[in-house]
Image (spheres, helix red, strand yellow):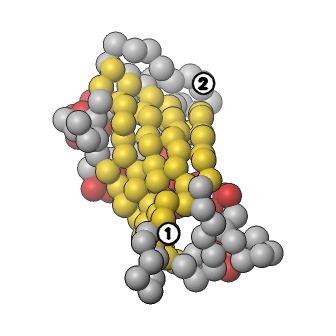
């Protein structure tokens, strides 16, 4: 079953690249978070980012993307836990001139609900957020994260 998806399209700008004009590894994180923001907007999850720090991030880089090229980043919620969410993502270089699109990077990351930064510690996701996302995500409500 496919979970909720967010898609972000962008052009690689000079600020996104290293001195050779190839996208910098941190650019992938920004593209993934932009797609995640699209997902949260689509499912009407307000106030998510300030209370959902990333606790794990993994990326495999498969192809370079250069200044001026277009990319499409797709983020999918693959697991909705009691207080964590696991996302998978792919960044695809949109080819021109009849060339096929090519996957540039793929990976996953985990966010945890931390509503009180002073106290710290995780807490269950708000019921309204779970209801909005739960119908399409792989759930594991009994697993404490």
Relative vertical location of residue 17 with respect to residue 53 in this rendering, above or below: below
Which numbered circle lies on residue 104? none
Q: Are marks 1 and 2 in contact (CB under 8 Å)?
A: no
Q: Residue at x 46, y 53 (%)?
A: 90
Tally of numbered discs: 2
Q: Name the secondary structure under disc 2.
A: loop
Q: Residue 41: percent from the left, percent from the top?
A: 32, 56
Q: Earlier in the sequence, mark 1 or mark 2?
A: 1
The front one of 17 and 35 is 17
Residue 45 position, x and y percent, is: 32, 47
Could you give the CA–CA distance between mark 1 and mark 2, rounded to whole angstroms?
42 Å
Figure quadrant of residue 97: bottom left
Q: Callout 1 environment at 10 Å: few (<14), some (14 to 19), or many (20+)? A: many
User: Which labelled disc corresponds to residue 93?
Assistant: 1
Residue 65, percent across and down?
A: 60, 70
The answer to which quarter of the image holds residue 128 is: top left
Give the crowd class for mark 2: few <14, some 14-19, many >=20 residues within 10 Å.
few
Residue 121, x across and y down, in percent: 56, 22
Left or right: where does residue 40 sit relative to residue 60?
left
Residue at 44 percent of width and 43 percent of height? 88
Residue 73 shows up from this direction: yes
Reply above or below: 9 against 42: below
Residue ID at (50%, 36%) = 111
Q: Residue at x 69, y 71 (%)?
A: 22
Given the current orientation, which residue lies at the most extreme bottom position? 97
The residue positioned farthest toward the left in the image shown: 135
Residue 37 in view of the camera: no
130 or 11: nearer the viewer: 11
- For marks 1 and 2, give the one nearer the viewer: 1
Residue 22 in the image: above or below residue 36? below
Residue 119 numbered tag: 2
């Amino acid at each position: 079953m496919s979970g909720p998806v967010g898609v972000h399209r962008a052009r690689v700008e000079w600020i996104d690249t290293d001195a050779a004009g190839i996208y910098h590894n941190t650019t992938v994180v920004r593209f993934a978070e932009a797609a995640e923001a699209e997902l949260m907007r689509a499912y009407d999850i307000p106030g998510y980012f300030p209370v959902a720090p990333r606790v794990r991030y993994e990326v495999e880089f498969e192809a370079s993307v250069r200044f001026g090229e277009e990319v499409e980043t797709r983020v999918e919620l693959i697991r909705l836990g009691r207080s964590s969410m696991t996302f998978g993502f792919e960044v695809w270089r949109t080819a021109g001139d009849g060339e096929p699109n090519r996957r540039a990077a793929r990976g996953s990351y985990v966010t945890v609900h931390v509503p009180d930064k002073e106290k710290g510690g995780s807490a269950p996701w708000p019921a309204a957020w779970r209801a909005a996302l739960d119908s399409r995500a792989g759930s594991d409500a009994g697993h404490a994260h």
